[in-house]
Amino acid sequence: MPLAPGVPDAKSMAAGGVTSMDDFLKKFFPDVYHRKQAHLHETDYCKYDNQLLTLFTSSLYFAGLVSTFGASYVTKRRGRRASIMVGATSFFLGGAINAAAMNIAMLIVGRVLLGVGIGFGNQAVPLYLSEIAPYRIRGAVNQLFQLTTCLGILVADIINYFTDRLHPWGWRLSLGLAMGPATAIFVGALFLPETPNSLVERGHLEEARRVLEKVRGTHKVDAEFEDLKEASDAARAVTGTFRNLLAVRNRPQLIIGALGIPAFQQLSGMNSILFYSPVIFQSLGFGSSAALYSSIITGSMLVVGALISMVTVDRLGRRFLFIEAGIQMISSMVVVAVILALKFGKGEELSKGVSTVLVVAICLFVVAYGWSWGPLGWLVPSELFPLEMRSAGQSVVVCVNLFWTAAVAQCFLAALCHLRWGVFVLFASLIVVMSIFVILLLPETKQVPIEEIWMLFDKHWYWKRIVRRDPKYQGNLHHQQQEMSRA
């Protein structure tokens, strides 16, 4: 059942498909609907530039940003499973309110509840998967989060394609079906074991050992169990968990895991394409159904990328996937920018050949994101933090991620309207920065036990100059070396 937690997040991400449905726009955003129909002699880049429409999308992420800190407390004190169940409940209520919405206020309330669900789910699920998995296949197991998210996006796009034909209530069915996966997650979580790491952290040692033996399929877990207990003892000695994120010894985790990767994941431009891919394809001259059908294509590319990542992440490593995908994403964005600069924005439909090249370039971008920044943006941060600040660190990850998600969602259509094709050049430039960031600062974490990853920074060409300044880090390193020598 660990597959399920990513689905609600996907359903909300694909809500961009609903914003291209005429019935939805006529009821809640009539100005956008009339502009879409009349074209108004304006540039095609500006048809959907409506801040109230984008607030419908981004309110979810502002809510998730705030709720993730409450999720941190629940995850640490009550366990990862409890946070998953709270998130599922909130998501169910949000889906119900959105399906019954009679005005924009109800839409926003529903989206806020969806955001709370995402805040809790994104905080707990990556931790759960990373902690429950054997370290040799931790990357592939953690990728289940992204795979189910991508499958959810694809399912949502297919649902939107068919519900768009159900007038005038198809959009209600599309939004209300979010209650289905939320229910599945809640019921599934009832049968999930808590992670051994969380049980040890909360003092349930006997139960932790039983769960560890069960999930590993062997009674020979003495070494791993001792590592968990030592990590837990160190965690209990730490006070002010969020404040300790600022300690010198945790500087790499803060900069890479909590700030850099979650921000760059959104600044790649991927979510803008996902949120508004129906809008983008509509603006290319396709009809409403064709726009939703195009979203199904990009959703399929995400699933393909996630499957490729699952197969390769523990073989090729995290750094390779980041770097290779960076090159592919930059190339794709440049192609998109050039085509839009030369052919788009004159109120005319693009030729079939030009449209095909544009769609292919977008798909190549999406599939590269699907095996790199999409899944690795959640996997790598969940690996980096030591146990004593893993829950707090993941909350900062989710907070930063959702902040930039909301900011990009709120600004993208206005930026598209004013920068036009230049917005894709901006994204390409940001991906160059992201790739350099990975090359210079991220150590390879594949097949390294999760409680030993902090030692990688002592060997890194740059981070060792930082972390060795902290006396506590040196004490931890000396203790670890003694344990390894005795073993």
Image (spheres, rainbow, N blue to C red):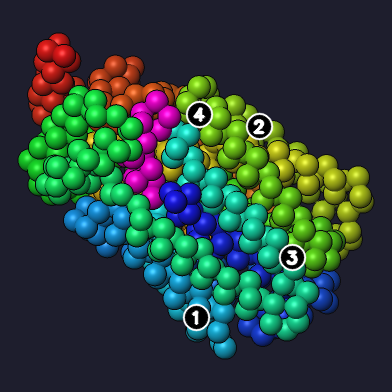
Spatial separation of the CA atoms under disc 1 and disc 2? 40 Å
Q: Would you call the spot at circle 3 few (<14 residues within 10 Å), some (14-19), or many (20 or more)? A: many
Front residue of 393/467: it is 393
Front residue of 220/266: it is 220
Q: Which residue is mark 3?
A: 161
Spatial separation of the CA atoms under disc 3 and disc 2? 29 Å
Q: Which residue is mark 2?
A: 328
**Which residue does the image show at 59% across and 37% down from the upper left?**
307
**Which residue does the image show at 21% across and 57% down from the upper left?**
78
Of mark 3 and mark 1, the one earlier in the sequence is 1
**Which residue does the image show at 31% across and 59% down from the upper left?**
83
Secondary structure under badge 3? Answer: helix
Q: Which residues are magenta?
A: 124-138
Of mark 4 and mark 3, the one earlier in the sequence is 3
Q: Is residue 202 left or right of residue 51?
A: left
Report which quarter residue 165 is drawn in.
bottom right
Of tags 2 and 4, the one toward the viewer is: 4
Q: Amino acid at mark 3?
A: Tyr
Q: Is residue 431 left or right of residue 448?
A: right
Q: Would you call the spot at circle 2 few (<14 residues within 10 Å), some (14-19), or many (20 or more)? A: some
Q: Quadrant of the C terminus?
A: top left
**Vertical side of 480 occupied by 359: above or below:** below
User: Residue 472: within the magenta?
Assistant: no
Q: Would you call the spot at circle 1 few (<14 residues within 10 Å), some (14-19), or many (20 or more)? A: many
Spatial separation of the CA atoms under disc 3 and disc 1? 22 Å
Q: Which residue is mark 4?
A: 313
**Vertical side of 356 occupied by 73: above or below:** below
Report which quarter residue 335 is drawn in.
top right
Secondary structure under badge 2? Answer: helix
Q: Amino acid at mark 2?
A: Gln
Percent from the top left, x then y, of residue 439? 47, 24
